[in-house]
Amino acid sequence: MSALIEARRPLYHTVAERLSLAIHERIYPVGVLLPSEAELCAQYGVSRHTVREAIRRLQQAGLVTSEHGIGTRVERDRVEARYLQTLASISDLWQYVKDTRRKPLDLRDVLPGEARMELPGDPAVPWRMLEGIRYLVKGRQPVSWTQIHVHPNYAKVINRKTDDAVPIYSLIERRFGLRVGRVRQEIAALAIPADIAALLKVPVESPGLAIVRYYESEAGEVVEATLSIHPAERYRYSMQLDLAYGT
């Protein structure tokens, strides 16, 4: 790493990395409390603000938990692998459901005006909504919070026991004999709100990534709409763009 990049790097990144290494090497084993803020400030020669930001990053990674009046306790000695999603075509969406498992939280009908995302169509006609948390197949930390909205015409395909290893749009295709020909996607950074942060087990307003997708049939009808929120430390998104040149 160049000296220029290192100089621009926030101190809390360095402190967080050093603490993470100390935890991994069991200098601070699972179950013990980290040194106090004052002790860490003296140890690393930094301010309390820097120490608090470093601890917050360790919390986001699931390595520690903090409790007022008690301290910061080591919960695990290594970071669970973040999920990397690569998208080059609609079929790649299958990989996400194969790599993760969904824990359903809620199933109900919602009017477009009540949804947390924009839903097209008649505002008086409700969509079927399934809310859930996704985990890596062999992981313990949540990868994402998600709400799946299915168009009223196709709502019967979704319930609490819907197979979480098959994309919902594929179930719609099979049952109703249509084809999804386009997925429109919007990605935005956000501070994770309190209710979702609690479900994802991350600090309130910690950095996250919101992904909105609209699945359109070949006739141009939106048959499914999804909103997913991912903790920044647990998710990476990769996409390939191929250039087409005229002849």
Image: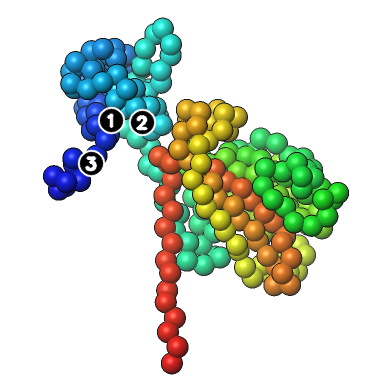
Judging depth in this view, the residue of 139 and 214 nearest the camera is 214
Judging depth in this view, the residue of 30 and 55 nearest the camera is 55
Mark 2 or mark 3: which comes first in sequence? 3
**SS label for mark 1:** helix
Question: Residue, x 42% and y 58% (percent of image)?
Answer: 238
Q: CA gap, disc 1 to disc 2? A: 9 Å
Mark 1 or mark 2: which comes first in sequence? 1
Above or below, 239 against 144 in this view is: below
Residue at the far bottom in the pictured view: 247
**Camera-nearest label, 1 or 2:** 1
Question: Residue, x 18% and y 22% (percent of image)?
Answer: 44
Q: Which quadrant of the structure image shows residue 47?
A: top left
Above or below, 92 against 19 in this view is: below
| Residue located beneath label 3 in the image | 8
* Image coords of residue 180 (percent x, y): 66, 67
The three-letter code of the residue at mark 1 reads Tyr
* Image coords of residue 138 (percent x, y): 45, 40
The three-letter code of the residue at mark 3 reads Arg
Q: CA gap, disc 1 to disc 3? A: 12 Å
Judging depth in this view, the residue of 42 and 30 nearest the camera is 42
| Residue located beneath label 1 in the image | 12
